[in-house]
Image (cartoon, rainbow, N blue to C red):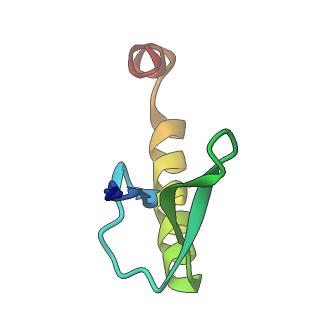
Amino acid sequence: MTTTQTPLATITHWIAGKPWDGAVSRWGDVYNPARGAASARVAFADTATVDAAVAAATAAARSWGRAGPRCRRALSR
């Protein structure tokens, strides 16, 4: 009997409205408790990646703050 393994799904960071395409030096497994096996791999952030995420979030917060109520409502739907 041969067992085929399907590749694990990859979960990366979401920064500035898109998946992070920078380097990742550490990964962790995401386990499915019902199966007792890994179901995905998740990227761990280093200091530079966290800094990029904070900078993007800060810029987004400024932009969101300048948006009026109608614009916010339209984007939230």
Please indicate whether residue 73 sits to the left or right of residue 31 in the image.
left
Q: Position of residue 30 (x, y in %)?
A: 59, 57
Front residue of 32/76: it is: 32
Whether residue 72 is situated above or below residue 12 in the rendered picture: above
Quadrant of the frame with the C terminus: top left
Total tally of numbered discs in the picture: 0
**Point 49% across, 76% down: residue:** 49
In the picture provided, is 29 more to the left or to the right than 72?
Answer: right
Q: Residue furthest right?
A: 33
Q: Residue at x 36, y 48 (%)?
A: 17
Q: Which residue is located at x 58 percent, y 84 percent?
A: 47
Relative vertical location of residue 27 with respect to residue 75 in this rendering, above or below: below
The quadrant where residue 11 appears:
bottom left
Q: Nearer the viewer, residue 36 or 30?
A: 36
26 relative to 29, above or below: below
Q: Residue at x 39, y 14 (%)?
A: 74
Quadrant of the frame with the N terminus = bottom left
Q: In the image, residue 5 lies at what x, y percent?
A: 35, 58
